[in-house]
Amino acid sequence: MKAIQLTEFSGADAMEYVDVPDPDAGDGEVVVEIVRSGVNFADTHVTRNDYLAKQELPLIPGAEVSGRTEDGQRVAAMLMNGGYAQRVAVPEAALVPVPDTVSDDQAAAILLQGLTAHALVHRCARLEPGETVVVEAAAGGTGILAVQLAKRQGARVIGLASSPEKRELVERLGADATGDSRADDLEAAILEANDGKPVDAVLEMSGGEAFEASMRTLAPFGRMVTFGIASREQNEVATGSLMRNSRSVVGFWLMHLFSDPVGMAEAVSELFGALEMGDLEVVIDSVRPLSEARQVHEDLAARRTQGKVLLDPHQ
């Protein structure tokens, strides 16, 4: 079968479009014929082996897929890796049945990032109606869903994005205000978008100075939720500052949801239900051939995408 494989950790340039052996299903596993592979920003970390979970070579990246089992069942699944391929062996317990009214594109686009957005809004930020939340990378796959879920929760939403076109998309999806994520003074841009008032929560995935600027906009009892380090610059937080301002910092990694299968199943059911009812929109930037995965990673890193990018492994 065709797959994207790495034999060294050096970023997008290390990804090769190659022939590899078909996967064998082990005990309790099912081989899935992949229809769509989801691309996530975390994948750009995996190709450098600087993400939270250390990887081993040779490696086929890709953490989410939609497709068909050998008996024709439509399924989606989250993976540790292996999604950038035509087929993958998946633990049967990890398969998520896809409703007939949800497309393969939607299923591959909403599982990982939808669960992330749901956890950020409900478990981590614990948003209450009337609170204000800042969503960073609001035109990205996770951000787009977080904007909509926060609005469904009754929050006032400020979306940060890097271009007028992206900010227009975020406003169409329900954001009450937007700001330029590349502003010279990000703190001032956030406060201006909130009529000069501090905010209750920030969903932050850049790290570095963006983290520091966003932290300064938090009101007393405000929550900083960090779910990425796109800048690859980690931050340190002084406990005295947290106490002085009654602020909190919450970290999130999707893998910990697997320890709560009941809660995860309920969140998936809610996400699919909202899709079926038309209450949640998945924005697909493009569906690209698997052979173009290297270019897709370069586009993602350069912020040239809006919404979700998917790979078609049979192109």
Image (tube, rainbow, N blue to C red):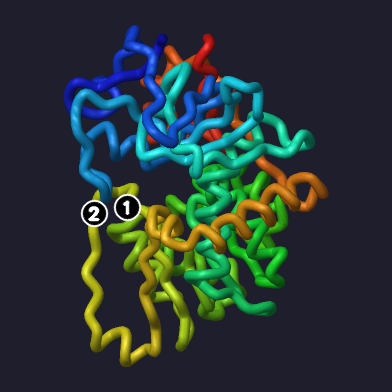
Q: Report which residue position mark 2 lands on.
A: 233
As helix, strand or loop, the secondary structure at mark 1 comes to loop
Rendering coords of residue 290 (x, y %): 46, 16
Rendering coords of residue 315 (x, y %): 53, 9
- Separation of marks 2 and 1 at Cα, in angstroms: 7 Å
Q: Is residue 167 visible?
A: yes
Rendering coords of residue 281 (x, y %): 71, 45
Rendering coords of residue 101 (x, y %): 78, 36
| Image quadrant in which you'd find residue 307 | top right
Front-most of 162 and 12? 12
Please, is residue 304 above or below residue 276 in the view? above
Considering every residue shown, the one lying at the far bottom of the view is: 244
Residue at horizontal 24 percent and vertical 88 percent from the top? 240
As helix, strand or loop, the secondary structure at mark 2 comes to loop
What amino acid is at disc 1?
Ile
Residue at horizontal 72 percent and vertical 64 percent from the top? 152
Considering every residue shown, the one lying at the far front of the view is: 27
Please, is residue 101 above or below residue 212 in the view? above
Q: Is residue 184 visible?
A: no
| Image quadrant in which you'd find residue 126 | bottom right
Q: Report which residue position mark 1 lands on.
A: 229
* Mark 1 surroundings within 10 Å by alpha-carbon count, few (fewer than 14), some (14 through 19), many (20 or more): some
Please, is residue 59 above or below residue 216 in the view? above
